[in-house]
Structure formats: C-alpha cells, structure tokens
Image (spheres, rainbow, N blue to C red):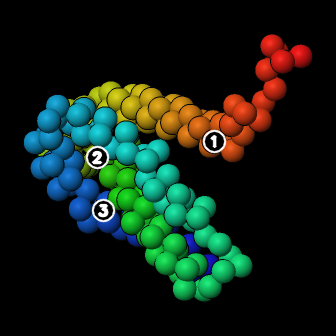
Amino acid sequence: MLVVVALLVLPLIASSAWGRQVWGGLAPAWPGGGYGFAATVGATVPLAPAAMIAPLIRIGWSRSKAGVLGWAAAALPGLAWCEANVFVIDASFRPKFRSDWDASCYARGGSCWVNVHYPFIWAVGLVTTLTMSAVLVVLIVKYVAKDDTADFGRDDVPSLAAT
C-alpha cells in the first residue's frame, strides 16, 4: 500500500520541484517549442505503459522466482517512464482556484505561464496521445494476427478447390 501511495505522490512532488525547469527551459528549446515538446510527451504516453506491461506479460509464475524477479525488474524502466510522463503533464496544469494564480504561477515555466504561452498545449498532447495509441493498437493487432497465422499455416486450412 505504501508503494502505491509513493508512486502516486512522487510525480506530484517532482512537478512542484522541477516543473518550472522543464517547461521554462527544456520545452522552449525543444524542436517545435512547447508544442513540439507537448507532442513528444503525448506520443510517449501510450508507449510508457506498454514498456512497463510487455515484460510483465512474459512472467512465468510457475517457473523460478529469479525469472519472475528478472521480468519484474525489466518492467521498472517503463514504470519510471510512466512516472516521468505524469510529472511533466502535471507541471502544466493550472491551479484549481483562480486565487492561486499569483506571480509565481506566471513566472517563466510556471503552470500559468505555460498555458499563456501555449494555450492549446492540451489539444496537441491529446491528439498525439490518441494517434500513438491507435498506431500501437494497429501494431499489436498485426503482431497477434502474425502469430495466429504462424500457428496455423496454410497447409492446415483446406482449400475450396479440394472439395
């Protein structure tokens, strides 16, 4: 339970500590500026959970514990990637109450500053996330279809000419 709470709280702490540096320094210098950065982050949003889940699918629970621990360790970079995405996205959210939109919010890299300089950043991130999700689904479907045809070759399927 403590691990789950830590995984939820760590990106929030990181966004308050380093969010200004990411959106105020890194994003404007990114190719395409803040919108290019949002597109990059949006494209990685569906890839990060895939990088975390792919090793976990390979776990053979009935085999050795070392193998289970190895595949679980292989999922940790995907988990860190997910946490980094949450951190970057959270750093761009404005405070809920307008009374919290003070001078520090409008300072370079602050969440209000991000939304003033890049007002449609949410749309860019959402469109790239949906596009990359669709591409990922198509690739998974093609991979599964390729595995199905490998299991059942053409020799196993009776042809209409033979009947």
Q: Dot 2, how many residues are within 10 Å of its Cα: few (below 14), some (14-19), or many (20+)?
A: many
Q: Position of residue 134 (x, y in %)?
A: 51, 31
User: Do tag 1 and tag 3 residues touch (Cβ < 8 Å)?
Assistant: no
Q: Earlier in the sequence, mark 1 or mark 3?
A: 3
Residue located 24% across and 32% down the image: 35
Q: Is residue 30 visible?
A: yes
Q: Position of residue 129 (x, y in %)?
A: 44, 36
Q: Which one is closest to the eye, mark 1 or mark 3? A: 1
Q: Is residue 133 visible?
A: no
Q: Position of residue 48 (x, y in %)?
A: 43, 53
Q: Position of residue 26 (x, y in %)?
A: 15, 49
Looking at the image, residue 23 sits to the left or right of residue 6; the answer is: left
Residue nearest the observer in this picture, 49 or 100:
49
Q: For the residue marked with disc 3, what is the amino acid?
A: Ser
Residue identifier under label 2: 111
Q: Tag 1, which secondary structure?
A: helix
Residue identifier under label 3: 16
Residue identifier under label 1: 150
Quarter-of-image position of residue 36: top left
> Image height check: is 156 above or below 52?
above
Residue located 43% across and 47% down the image: 47
In the picture as drawn, the residue positioned furthest to the top comes out as 161
Q: For the residue marked with disc 1, what is the amino acid?
A: Ala
